[in-house]
Image: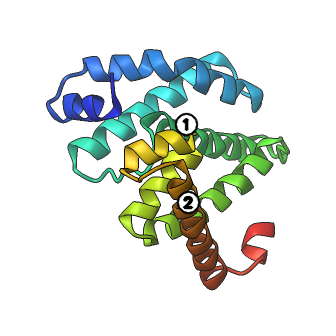
């Protein structure tokens, strides 16, 4: 089932789409949370909460999806789990220092990149998303985007990436990426 079909079914109130997403993404979320000091039960709770967030945003027309649904659910789950770890840390009085701290920094950097991506034109944004997030080959990109060939796609990707780099450097300082 495509992401577009899932969104269409959810907008129509069809809960089968949520079941599909749950089955498709559950193991990925469990692995992420267990790798970051959690249990499978905690992962199940977090993922259910992430699905509720996703469902509500769609139903209230507040979802701006700039990636695959699985990527969105992973990010929401990751944020929910980070908040849960912080809550546990406050209650235990200990500072929980886990490898997730590095992941959160990576996530912050990704959010900066995402903001700049959203500032690009539709063609560049779509091309870069397909290339970097969907891992599409240059040949497939050329077909998908209607370019003459893979070389044209490669040239356009280079120009779009250069523009993205320019936007990042113009709007953020290096320390935004190092904190």
Give the number of the mark in front: 1 or 2. 2
Q: Residue furthest bottom?
A: 170
Residue 36 picture quarter: top right
Label 1's element?
helix
For this view, does 22 lie left or right of residue 176?
Answer: left
Is any part of residue 76 visible from this angle?
Answer: no
In which quadrant of the rendered view does residue 9 lie? top left
Residue visible at 52% across and 25% down in the picture: 45
- Residue 165: x and y in percent read 64, 72
Q: Residues within 10 Å of mark 2 (few under 14, many from 20)?
A: many
Q: Which mark is residue 179?
A: none
Name the residue at 19% across, 23% down.
14
The local crowd at label 1, few if under 14, some if 14 to 19, many if 20 or more residues have their Cα within 10 Å, is some
Residue 35 lies in what quarter of the image? top right
In the rendered image of this protein, does residue 156 appear above or below residue 133? below
* Residue at the spot 45% in from the left edge and 72% down from the top edge: 119
Q: Residue at x 82, y 43 (%)?
A: 96
User: Number of marks in the image?
Assistant: 2
Residue 9 in view here? yes
Question: In the picture, which quadrant includes the N terminus?
Answer: top left
* Residue 80 position in % (x across, y down): 56, 41
Q: Looking at the image, do the residues carrying marks 1 and 2 touch, with CB atoms under 8 Å apart?
A: no
Residue 104 place in picture, x, y as percent: 70, 51
Q: In the rendering, at what x and y percent does residue 124 appear? A: 46, 63
Query: Observer-nearest residue: 133 or 14?
Result: 133
Q: Is residue 2 above or below residue 84?
A: above
The residues tagged by marks 1 and 2 sit, at their Cα atoms, a distance apart of: 26 Å
Q: What residue is disc 2 on?
A: 157
Mark 2 element type: helix
Residue topped by disc 1 = 74
The quarter in which the C terminus is drawn is: bottom right
> Relative to 123, is 173 on the left or the right?
right
């Amino acid at each position: 089932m495509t992401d577009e079909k899932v969104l269409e079914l959810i907008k129509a109130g069809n809960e089968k789409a949520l079941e599909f997403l749950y089955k498709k993404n559950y193991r990925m979320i469990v692995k992420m949370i267990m790798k970051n000091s959690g249990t499978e039960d905690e992962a199940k709770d977090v993922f259910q909460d992430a699905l509720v967030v996703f469902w509500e945003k769609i139903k209230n027309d507040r979802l701006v999806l700039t990636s695959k649904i699985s990527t969105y659910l992973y990010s929401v789950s990751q944020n929910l789990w980070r908040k849960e770890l912080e809550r546990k840390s406050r209650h235990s009085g200990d500072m929980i220092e886990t490898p997730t701290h590095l992941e959160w920094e990576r996530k912050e950097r990704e959010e900066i990149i995402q903001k700049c991506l959203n500032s690009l034109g539709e063609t560049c944004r779509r091309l870069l998303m397909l290339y970097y997030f969907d891992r599409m080959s240059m040949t497939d990109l050329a077909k998908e985007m209607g370019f003459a060939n893979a070389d044209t796609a490669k040239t356009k990707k280079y120009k779009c990436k250069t523009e993205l780099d320019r936007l990042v450097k113009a709007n953020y300082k290096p320390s935004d990426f190092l904190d």
